[in-house]
Image: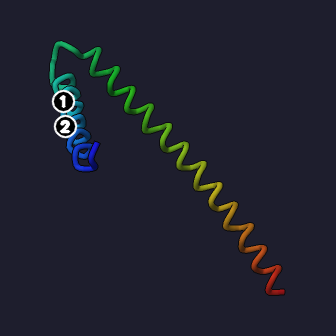
Amino acid sequence: MKKETKIIVGVLAGAALGATIALALSSDSTSDLKNKVSDFFADLLDASKDKLAGLTNKAASVAGKVKDKVTEINA
């Protein structure tokens, strides 16, 4: 597939997914579905925050080690 085709397919798939979610969340008769989708996205957001915090800690650790090595080399 060409790059442009992949982009168009991605945009159309995103639009279709967005429309599906919007319809599911706007319907009053599907409150159970609303809760499930809402819980799914809340869990996804929490997992993302946890992974980001882990990466931040790891980056800080690596930065500290690099700083220590630079200090050691300059001494």
> 10 Å neighbourhood of mark 1: few (<14), some, or many (≥20)?
few
| Residue at point 16%, 17% (across, down) | 28
Q: Name above or below for residue 60 compared with residue 31.
A: below
Q: Where does the image place residue 29, in percent across and percent down from the top left?
A: 17, 13
- Disc number for residue 12: 2
> 10 Å neighbourhood of mark 2: few (<14), some, or many (≥20)?
few
| Residue at point 82%, 79% (across, down) | 72
**Quarter of the figure that contains the N terminus:** top left
Identity of the amino acid at label 1? Ala
Local secondary structure at mark 2: helix
First along the sequence among labels 2 and 1:
2
In-image side of 65 versus 39 (left or right)? right
| Residue at point 67%, 67% (across, down) | 63
**Quarter of the figure that contains the C terminus:** bottom right
Q: Which residue is mark 1?
A: 22
Identity of the amino acid at label 2? Leu
Foreground residue among 14 and 71: 14
